[in-house]
Amino acid sequence: MDNKNATDLFAFPGSAHNSEPWWSALFSTLLLHLATHPSHGPIPLRRFTTSGTKWGYECEGNLELPAGLQFGQILTEPRLSQRVFGVTDWDYSFEALRPDVAVIVPGARFAILVENKTIGADLGTKGRQLRTGLELTMYLRTHSWKAESLFLLSVGYTNNRDLKLIRDSKVRIILWEDAFKLMNKIDRFRELFIGIDLSVYCNAEQSGTGWQG
């Protein structure tokens, strides 16, 4: 790849770098901005696909945010509960799930749960984090919610075990490179990265060869 990817920015400036929650909060702020400035979007959604040693992030629609989205409806690492979703029956195992970013609009029965993966974290034993998120969204759908679990990661994310689980589970993905591409066009976000050229980190190739899974 001629250009660096978002993972290189996550690791900047080296051994001391911003934690995953910091990046999750930044992404939450981008969602709030796009809710009131939809012309600055959209955020593409993708699928991770492989064929032999070929891999790629194929575009499959865009992230759709409900109209009138407000500050209190975008949460970072929230504690989920029966009360949040207003359901009569509830599996308390869901309360172990703390999505990095959640868009929850009870009035519209709309929920998006986003797991952010930057560096130094994975999906846990047997992909439990992914499986629990999918179980919750399926549960919400049976209770008339429009719900989806998404992953937010970089093309530089190289945990093939996790990528295989994401591929096989058909979970859609938001690429940090796409998010940074949008941020680079918005003054208030570009100005946060003083001394950094965001374009260096958002134009990495989104397909290639060398997959081993």
Image (cartoon, grey):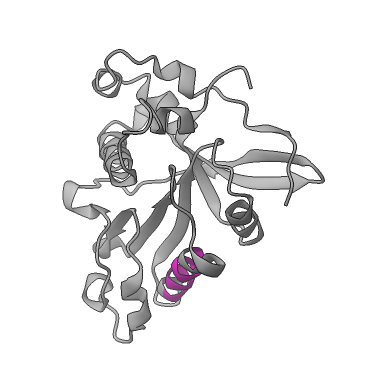
The residue located at (47%, 17%) in the rendering is 200
From the viewer's perspective, is 4 left or right of 94? right
Quarter occupied by residue 98: bottom left
- Which residue extends farthest bottom? 89
- Could you say where residue 187 lies in the image, as x and y percent from the top left? 27, 17
| Residue at the spot 42% in from the left edge and 32% down from the top edge | 179
Give the camera-side residue of 73 and 178. 178
Q: Main secondary structure of the magenta part?
A: helix
Q: Residue at x 45, y 59 (%)?
A: 148
Residue 10, given in percent of the width and then of the height, sits at 40, 33
Question: Vertical placement of 54 versus 165: above or below?
Answer: above
Position of residue 146 relative to residue 143, above or below, is: above
Across and down, in percent, residue 100 comes to 34, 53
Q: Which residues are magenta?
A: 130-139
In the image, farthest residue toward the right: 52
Residue 37 sits in quarter: top left
* Residue depicted at 26% across the width and 78% down the height: 82
Q: Residue 59 is drawn in which quadrant?
A: top right
Is 169 left or right of 82, judged from the image as shown?
right
Considering depth in this image, is 138 or 75 the residue closer to the camera? 75
Picture mark count:
0
Query: Where does residue 191 sit, x and y in percent of width and height?
Result: 25, 18
In the picture, the quarter occupied by the N terminus is top right
Instruction: Let me know if residue 56 is in the magenta part.
Output: no
- Left or right position of 26 against 148: left
Q: Measured along the vertical axis of the image, is residue 148 above or below residue 95?
A: above
Q: Is residue 48 left or right of residue 212?
A: left
The residue most toward the left is 72
